[in-house]
Image (spheres, rainbow, N blue to C red):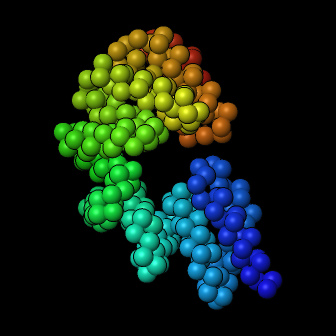
């Protein structure tokens, strides 16, 4: 009974940790990681299937966020099998989707596409339009990475149509942002700015500060490419303020670097050196 109570508690912790961002997960997993692994072993011994799935999911997400891709893939494949065995088509598709993300993070785009298409086949069969929108988005991401911008744009527009149809504002914001990236890569800066602003409007409305920081940063890049350095600096500083407040060190470093580029372009070498040293 003590073991069951322990598993129940850690299963609840796992459910709370799984959807968090990596910077929010780091400390809880540092404190409770061993307990979560022990709880998973106990849940399997006691045949507590709901807890097994919750703990596996949480540990898989943290492994993926920590870039431990071997562990993440093993856990997600196990999760997919468990969900398939219980007839949970949506959960099975979600696990395939995450396996696609893991392969994509490893830049194995062929494997990623195979996993995404497995997820998409289930989602289209059961009419899961939100899930399908997410997969279309990731297929766009693969095409973008391979610099097939025409294909990327097609996938993103398919994703956007479903996100807007289902009222998934966060999904729409994410796809607007990527359409901005596609336009930027093709040097269509007016279109890029328009897409980023559409993304930013939703991120600010939803209070997604991290997403807003990313859009501010990209708007700074567009302004820099247009050689509007005053506007670029304003956008970058807005992005930096959020990154520093949230403790997103990588984002802050990236924006410090871009502020150095702005100063360098304006021949202010003292300021440029200061920004680069911060980065």
Seen as rendered, the residue at the extreme right is 2
Q: Is residue 61 left or right of residue 111?
A: right
Question: In the rendering, at what x and y percent does residue 56 appear?
Answer: 56, 72
Specify the quadrant of the image occupied by residue 198.
top left
Question: In the rendering, at what x and y percent does residue 240 appear?
Answer: 58, 28
Quadrant the N terminus occupies: bottom right
Question: In the rendering, at what x and y percent does residue 115 appear?
Answer: 32, 65
Q: How many dots with numbers? A: 0
Q: Does the image show residue 145?
A: no
Residue visible at 24% across and 29% down in the picture: 186
Question: In the rendering, at what x and y percent does residue 275 appear?
Answer: 57, 25
Residue visible at 29% across and 59% down in the picture: 124
Specify the quadrant of the image occupied by residue 151.
top left
Seen as rendered, the residue at the extreme bottom is 45
Residue visible at 26% across and 23% down in the picture: 188
Residue visible at 35% across and 48% down in the picture: 133
* In the depicted structure, whether residue 129 falls above or below residue 160: below
Q: Nearer the viewer, residue 253 or 6?
A: 6
Quadrant the C terminus occupies: top right
Q: Does the image show residue 37?
A: yes
* In the depicted structure, whether residue 105 falls above or below residue 268: below
* In the depicted structure, whether residue 250 falls above or below residue 74: above
Q: Nearer the viewer, residue 127 or 95?
A: 127
Specify the quadrant of the image occupied by residue 123.
bottom left
């Amino acid at each position: 009974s003590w073991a069951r109570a322990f598993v129940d508690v850690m299963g609840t912790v796992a459910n709370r940790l799984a959807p968090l961002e990596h910077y929010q997960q780091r400390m809880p997993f540092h404190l409770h990681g061993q307990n979560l692994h022990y709880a998973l072993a106990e849940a399997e011994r006691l045949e507590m299937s709901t807890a097994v799935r919750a703990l596996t999911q949480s540990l898989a997400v943290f492994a993926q966020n920590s870039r431990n891709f071997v562990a993440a893939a093993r856990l997600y494949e196990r999760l997919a099998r468990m969900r398939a065995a219980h007839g949970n088509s949506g959960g099975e598709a979600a696990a395939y989707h995450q396996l696609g993300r893991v392969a994509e993070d490893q830049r194995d785009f062929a494997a990623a596409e195979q996993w995404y298409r497995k997820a998409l086949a289930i989602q289209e069969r059961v009419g899961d339009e939100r899930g399908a929108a997410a997969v279309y988005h990731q297929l766009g991401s693969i095409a973008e990475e391979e610099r097939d911008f025409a294909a990327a744009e097609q996938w993103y527009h398919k994703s956007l149509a479903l996100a807007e149809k289902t009222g998934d504002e966060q999904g729409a914001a994410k796809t607007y942002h990527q359409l901005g990236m596609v336009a930027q890569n093709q040097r269509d800066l007016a279109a890029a700015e328009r897409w980023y602003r559409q993304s930013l409007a939703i991120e600010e409305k939803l209070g997604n500060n991290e997403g807003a920081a990313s859009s501010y940063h990209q708007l700074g890049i567009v302004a820099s490419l247009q050689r509007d350095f005053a506007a670029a600096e304003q956008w970058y500083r807005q992005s930096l303020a959020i990154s520093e407040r949230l403790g997103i060190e990588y984002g802050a470093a990236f924006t410090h670097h871009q502020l150095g580029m702005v100063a360098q372009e304006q021949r202010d070498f003292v300021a440029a050196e200061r920004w680069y040293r911060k980065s």
